[in-house]
Image: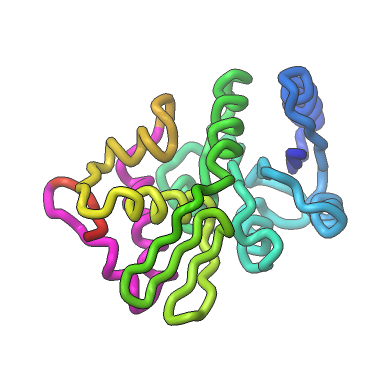
Amino acid sequence: MIYLLEDDESIRKFVVYALNQTGLEAKGFELPSQFRKAVAERVPDLALLDIMLPEEDGISVLKSLRAAPATARLPVIMLTAKSGEYDKVSGLDSGADDYIVKPFGTMELVSRIRALLRRAGGGDESYTVGKLYVNPKQHTVTVDGKPVLLTLKEFELLCHMLSQRGTVFSRDRLLEEIWGYDYDGENRTVDVHIRTLRAKLGECGSVVETVRGVGYKIS
């Protein structure tokens, strides 16, 4: 189930119809209060959030999702007419997994959604680096035994680099392998996610090393 929070009725109805036609079950909500009530009753597989909304903005809704254990790792894509770098970085800093600027193509939206849903699972192997423990199958991360809540993209980045320890990943490669080959983003996207990942890992944040002039690695 995919939830769409969009106050523009024409866009809301079009997106819900388009997703349902491609086999993705979706429901639309006009107000954040309606969206919150629905999430409380059933957590969706993915959420699409507009930024400019009545009652409160989409960034506020996103932050509340990330603050709640039940939705801390919920895949979230921001849909908005705001295209400035500040708005993109603000959304990513707040925990968004992807960002699509209006107007957007239906196939692009469906592709982004399917890519996130495919990655929402995990592998069977677990990883331990010092006090850091990651279990992809259980989707858990702990530092010195204490749980760490990551967004889906932060979790994917961490698991991807852990699965190939010692490999140096360029920003372009991470964009391609984590966001997908058709992701029309910037290197800044990777840097933002690496920064927030390190902050959340606390004393274990240093496991993600910067290779000057190239990218990142986990030794």
Looking at the image, the residue that sits furthest to the left is 213
**Is residue 87 rendered magenta in the image?**
no
- Which quadrant would the C terminus be assigned to in this image? bottom left
**Color scheme of the displayed model:** rainbow
Q: Nearer the viewer, residue 95 or 140?
A: 140
Which residue shows up at 51% across the image and 71% down it? 148
Residue 77 location (% of width, % of height): 59, 42
- The range drawn in magenta is 185-213
Find residue 15 and report its horizontal and vertical position in percent: 73, 26
Total label count?
Answer: 0
- Quadrant containing the N terminus is top right
Image coordinates of residue 48 in percent, x first then y, are 67, 41
Q: Is residue 67 left or right of residue 217?
A: right
Q: Is residue 117 left or right of residue 203?
A: right
Q: Main secondary structure of the magenta part?
A: helix
Magenta span has 197? Answer: yes
Q: Residue 12: x and y, percent?
A: 77, 31
- 56 left or right of 83? right
Query: What residue is rendered at 62% in x and 61% in y?
Result: 72
- Above or below for 142 versus 37: below
Kindly identify the residue that appears in the image at 56 percent across and 58 percent down.
Answer: 139
Q: Nearer the viewer, residue 55 or 162?
A: 162
Which of these two is toward me, 70 or 80?
70
The residue under the point 36% across, 33% down is: 176
The residue most toward the front is 124
Q: Quadrant of residue 11?
A: top right
* Whether residue 15 is situated above or below residue 98 in the rendered picture: above
